[in-house]
Image: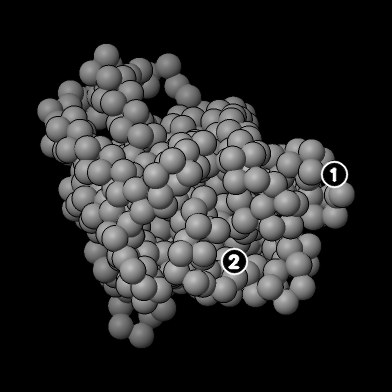
Amino acid sequence: METTSMKETSSEPSASPRIRRAQRVALALLVVSGAVNYLDRGTLAVANASIRGDLGLSMGQMGVLLSAFSWSYALCQLPMGGLADRVGPRRLLGAGLILWSLAQAAGGLVATFGWFIIARIALGIGEAPQFPSAARVVSNWFPLRERGTPTGIFNAASPLGTALAPLVLSILVVSFSWRWAFIATGAAGIVVALVWFALYRDPVRSRLSVDECRYLDAGAEHGVSAPKVTFADWRELFSHVTTWGMLIGFFGSVYLNWVYLTWLPAYLTTERHMSLLRTGFAASVPFFCGFIGALSAGWFSDLITRGSRNAVASRRNAAVVAMLGMVAFTIPAALAQSNTVAIACISVVIFLANAASACSWALATAAAPSNRVASLGSIQNFGGFIGGSLAPIVTGFIAQRWSFVPALLTAAAIAFIGAMAYLLLVRKPIPEHSAHAAAAAPSGEAPAAQS
């Protein structure tokens, strides 16, 4: 069984100025597109009360509407990862940007519950390429030992967009209407798509020198020259316990995160009786903490990985510790009488949730063969957003039947199970050639078992 050694040698080349420029451009574009991605997702949560009043929706119906995006998003993760590995992130993410921006704008034009669900389903399909493509961009432009920091940076876009949503969108909703909030964010996405196509290039399209290729390939069997992923390669990932541990683990992490992401503004107005404008400020504070959490987790993940002989174990352990912290701070967040204490605890939870997410995506770049990084990352994200799909529905119906307190405690229990799945099931990296070895095995001879 292969393990990843993080030892550096003096013969390894450093990044050229051209590579560094490409890295900076790629990360800047991923942060901007990711922030718009989460700004679009958060529009429905910010305008929750206005939409319920305008369309006459119950809390349970709003839970279904909040989850409609997540179901299509989760299901599309499976093909999108393989597509990102096969056609490259430039074309896939660019097309996704255009589709999700049109769907977001359409959400501002709907008149019925049914049409709103259709618009949210289309939004989920369009946004599905964002994070698998981002993982592949990092895998393409950064060597294995340096991927934690850029992974933390592109993951930081999600809490950044979520933090900006209450501040920016509350003003739009109060000053104009919830419909203009959807239309304005959809238009912003179209602009970002044009900039992405104009500035970003996949490294396979670039004229890289020998030293540049050696820098990018350091620590991996294949890098920019990795063979294109096949359906057999993608399907074979499901034969590994590591894949299932990542899928189940991310289910628990995203479930708890999405309870806050989709219901926090409504929780603050309904359960804690805050005004919409005050909620806009209060709800943004935890997600700015999440932004810091994602950035610091990526850097810390790289730091501990450089000192470890096993990149998978070090990145997995960082995710597990963050998830257990999420569980620990959700309990006082649910039970505290003080709004200030509750928001402080929620801020810690979201800091750790985004740290866990960054570590989980960095784990995908360490556990996957180099030509299947987006594929494994998207399978993990599929599990996460099955959790993200269930979280708004379950939370809505529990809050409607009882209150938000048992809903938050339920989410904490699910996150704990996810942390244990990471810890107990994700033990070793997936071998580079396991799919090809299985295909090449003589008839009647089973290939060696893999973890």
Which colouring convention does the figure follow? one colour
Q: Is residue 60 left or right of residue 212?
A: right
The residue that disc 1 covers is: 338
Check the picture and name the quadrant holding the C terminus: bottom right
SS at badge 2: helix
- Separation of marks 1 and 2 at Cα, in angstroms: 25 Å
Please state the horizontal and vertical placement of residue 305, each as a whole percent of the image: 58, 34
Left or right: 422, with 444 as reference point:
right
- Residue 119 position in % (x across, y down): 32, 65
The residue sitting at the top extreme is 17
Q: Residue at x 79, y 50 (%)?
A: 333
Judge by depth and name the residue closer to the eye, 22 or 391: 391
Q: Earlier in the sequence, mark 1 or mark 2?
A: 1
Q: Position of residue 233 (x, y in %)?
A: 31, 64
Residue wearing tag 2: 391
Task: Report whether 25 appears left or right of 268.
Answer: left
Please report the residue visible at 41 percent of the width from the left and 64 percent of the height from the top.
69
| Element under disc 1 | loop
Residue 451, numbered circle: none
Percent position of residue 322, x then y: 68, 44
Residue 197 appearing in the image: yes
Between 138 and 53, the residue placed more toward the observer is: 53
- Circle 2: residue type: Ala
Question: 8 or 197: which is nearer to us?
Answer: 197
Q: Quadrant of residue 110?
A: bottom left
Residue drawn 50% across and 57% down? 50
Local crowd size for mark 1, using a 10 Å CA cut-off: few (<14), some (14–19), many (≥20): few
